[in-house]
Image (cartoon, rainbow, N blue to C red):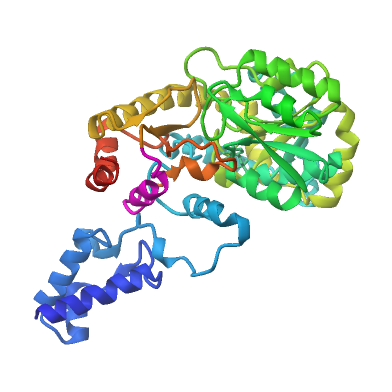
């Protein structure tokens, strides 16, 4: 009998890890499988019990048994060799696409006003006019451009008009458009180090003279930029909350950066991906709000404020470059679905967006504390967190060890989608820790339970 149960266990485990059986798939009942395999029910029962115990299956009583829907299929990835210098970055693709807790960049999905959204979606579908059923306007749906202009002017301190707003499908389209429209692909481009992995990945491929500038507790080191790369044509920065360190670019450095751009006729690309979420004082205005010389290209997104699946982001173009953006947009872009833009335009126009942001600011501040408390309870003294003024994630720095990559993979094997800070760096002066999000934590108890999973392995690795 022992051999029988082991064989069934091994067969399921292998099929689940190979991705043949997928998270959420139903498996046969004990009775049916026992009959099918012609073994005693107890044999199947024993195999299922171990698979449930190890988290491969979940038993849902009368509803039957399924492959655990929260399972991250680390071993199911195709066995493909990573592409050249992207090897370190490929870990992030798995993190972005896999399921699990503490995932970066995902807003609080349980707090999204779904009912209101459905209502607005229904209205948008019903009111779609034949003229809106043709090709989407390349620069964006006018009511949404207007709503965004009014939002960024009021909330982010900008001073733009609706015709400066260009609607796109996300960060990567934005960067491609910017590189093309400004004709800077072969000019010197500088990027933060550490820096956003999708930015690094795209720029490594498409910007021929890419350089990195270190980031410290006050944001990008502008003195370093001036010393080493004053001739850069473009600097891509995350001033509100740096990605991934979450620090805010200091006011003196903001001015220094703007002065440099104005003096050299260079461009600053401001990636304001989560600037809405600032907790300690009033929401911090964007860098663009200080830009009197029109050198800043502002990028915003609805991925953090609404949901990533919506795929709507925007660029606020400098006045002087609008024609070049339009011309490039007409070559590269097919437009964003009008229906989605229509729903969003009403969501903003009727004030639901503002209400939602306000609610999320309070909620995220609370959820951040839950995760911090949990780290303190489960791992007293092991991590150091330099609390920033906002953002949607924290970095738990390792106090002494440099083994964050090993630690991250231990946590990932417990379905915790954290990433190793060292993997975000390109220069050699790295720091080490785990980057994790708290936006979907619902209680301190839940956070404690989640991060206790890898406790024994974590302590064995780090102490
Ligand atoms: C640093 C950074 N920039 C931009 C974005 C927004 O990208 P997108 O609008 O394509 O979702 C993200 C989202 O994760 C981000 O982390």
Left or right of 168 in this view: 50: left
Residue visible at 80% across and 31% down in the picture = 317
**Residue 93 or residue 402, whichever sits in front:** 402
Q: Could you tell me if residue 157 is visible in this image?
A: no
Q: Position of residue 354 (x, y in %)?
A: 56, 23
Q: Quadrant for ligand 1? A: top right
Quadrant where the C terminus sits is top left
Q: Could you tell me if residue 198 is visible in this image?
A: yes
Magenta includes 427?
no
Magenta range is: 401-415
Based on the displayed image, in which of its 4 quarters is residue 312 positioned?
A: top right
Up/down of 200 relative to 62, above or below: above
Q: Position of residue 152 (x, y in %)?
A: 68, 23
Q: Position of residue 62 (x, y in %)?
A: 20, 62
Quadrant where the N terminus sits is bottom left
Residue visible at 56% across and 43% down in the picture = 308
Residue visible at 68% across and 42% down in the picture = 127
Left or right of 437 in this view: 206: right
Residue visible at 27% across and 28% down in the picture = 381
Q: Position of residue 368 (x, y in %)?
A: 39, 27
């Amino acid at each position: 009998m022992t051999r029988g149960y082991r064989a069934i266990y091994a067969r399921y485990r292998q099929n689940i890890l190979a991705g043949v059986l997928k998270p959420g798939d139903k498996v046969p009942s004990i009775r049916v499988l026992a009959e099918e395999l012609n073994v005693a029910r107890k044999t199947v029962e024993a195999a299922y019990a171990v698979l449930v115990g190890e988290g491969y299956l979940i038993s849902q009583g009368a509803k039957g048994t399924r492959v655990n829907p929260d399972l991250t299929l680390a071993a199911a990835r195709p066995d493909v060799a990573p592409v050249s210098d992207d090897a370190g970055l490929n870990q992030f693709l798995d993190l972005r696409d896999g399921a699990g807790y503490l995932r970066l960049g995902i807003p609080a999905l349980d707090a999204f006003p779904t009912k209101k959204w459905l209502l607005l979606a229904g209205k948008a579908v019903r009111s779609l006019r034949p003229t809106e059923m043709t090709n989407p306007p390349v620069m964006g749906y006018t009511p949404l451009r207007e709503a965004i202009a009014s939002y960024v002017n009021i909330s982010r301190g900008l001073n733009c008009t609706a015709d400066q707003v260009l609607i796109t499908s996300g960060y990567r389209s934005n960067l491609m458009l910017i590189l093309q429209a400004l004709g800077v692909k072969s000019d010197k481009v500088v990027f933060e180090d550490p820096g956003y992995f999708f930015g690094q990945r795209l720029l490594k491929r498409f910007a021929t003279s890419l350089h990195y500038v270190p980031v410290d507790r006050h944001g990008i080191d502008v003195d370093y930029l001036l010393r080493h790369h004053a001739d850069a044509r473009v600097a891509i920065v995350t001033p509100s909350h740096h990605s991934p360190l979450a620090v805010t670019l200091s006011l003196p450095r903001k001015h220094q950066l703007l002065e440099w751009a104005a003096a050299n006729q260079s461009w600053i690309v401001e990636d304001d991906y989560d600037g809405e979420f600032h907790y300690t004082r009033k929401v911090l205005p964007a860098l663009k709000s200080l830009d009197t010389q029109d050198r800043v290209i502002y990028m915003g997104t609805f991925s953090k404020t609404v949901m990533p699946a919506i795929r709507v982001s925007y660029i606020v173009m400098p006045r002087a470059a609008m024609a070049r953006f339009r011309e490039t947009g007409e070559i590269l872009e097919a437009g964003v679905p009008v229906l989605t833009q229509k729903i969003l335009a009403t969501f903003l126009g009727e004030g639901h967006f503002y209400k939602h942001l306000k609610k999320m600011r309070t909620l995220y501040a609370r959820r951040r504390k839950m995760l911090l408390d949990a780290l303190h309870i489960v791992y007293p003294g092991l991590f150091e967190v330099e609390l920033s003024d906002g953002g949607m994630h924290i970095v738990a720095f390792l106090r002494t060890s440099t083994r964050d990559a090993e630690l991250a993979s231990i946590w990932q094997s417990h379905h915790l989608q954290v990433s190793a800070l060292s993997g975000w760096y390109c220069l050699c002066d790295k720091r080490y820790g785990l980057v994790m999000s708290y936006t979907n934590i619902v209680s301190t108890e839940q956070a404690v339970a989640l991060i206790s999973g890898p406790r024994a392995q974590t302590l064995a690795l780090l102490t």
